[in-house]
Image (tube, grey):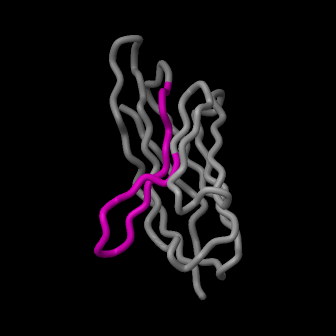
Amino acid sequence: QVQLVESGGGLVQAGGSLRLSCAASGSIFSINAMGWYRQSPGKQRELVAVITRGGSINYADSVKGRFTISRDNAKNTVYLQMNSLKPEDTAVYYCKSSVCSSRHKCTEYWGQGTQVTVSS
């Protein structure tokens, strides 16, 4: 079994910064893509950023230039540095990772979510 544990959410004023972390633990052979998603009340969950094991990155247009995703493969951890935060960034942020327990078996896992609130 695999667990994803997120941390780093909180309350911040507009223009401020936060850094989210998501650490995977358990039966891990390797991890493919790791990403961050967010969901605000009444809206669908949306992709924020994703990074492959090789380091290829994609961002949602709404966060380009403000957010930076990175990962530490040795620690099975993905990070999201969020700068110049706006009230519309307020949401529950979820980590998702494609975790392989062997060379041929990979499963997607979600973290429990961490609340980010940006006040105006």
Q: What residue occupies the far front of the structure in this picture?
A: 61
Image location of residue 108, percent across then percent down? 35, 35
Pick whichever, 15 or 112, lies toward us: 15
Q: Is residue 45 magenta?
A: yes
Residue at 42% from the left image edge and 49% from the top image edge: 111
Image location of residue 59, percent across then percent down? 54, 49
Q: What residue occupies the far top of the structure in this picture?
A: 103
Work out which quarter of the rendered image holds the N terminus and state it.
Answer: top left
* Vertical order, 84 against 36 (above or below): below
Residue at 29% from the left image edge and 74% from the top image edge: 42
Q: Which residues are magenta?
A: 31-49
Q: Quadrant of residue 98?
A: top left
- Secondary structure mostly seen in magenta is strand
Total residue callouts: 0
Q: Is residue 42 left or right of residue 13?
A: left
Image location of residue 8, percent across then percent down? 61, 61
Pick whichever, 57 or 19, lies toward us: 57
Q: Quadrant of residue 63?
A: bottom right
Residue at 63% from the left image edge and 33% from the top image edge: 75
Q: Is residue 59 left or right of residue 104?
A: right
* Vertical order, 5 against 9 (above or below): above
Image location of residue 104, percent across then percent down? 35, 12
* Vertical order, 1 against 22 (above or below): above
Work out which quarter of the rendered image holds the C terminus and state it.
Answer: bottom right
Q: What residue occupies the far bottom of the structure in this picture?
A: 120
Residue at 62% from the left image edge and 31% from the top image edge: 55
Q: Is residue 48 magenta?
A: yes
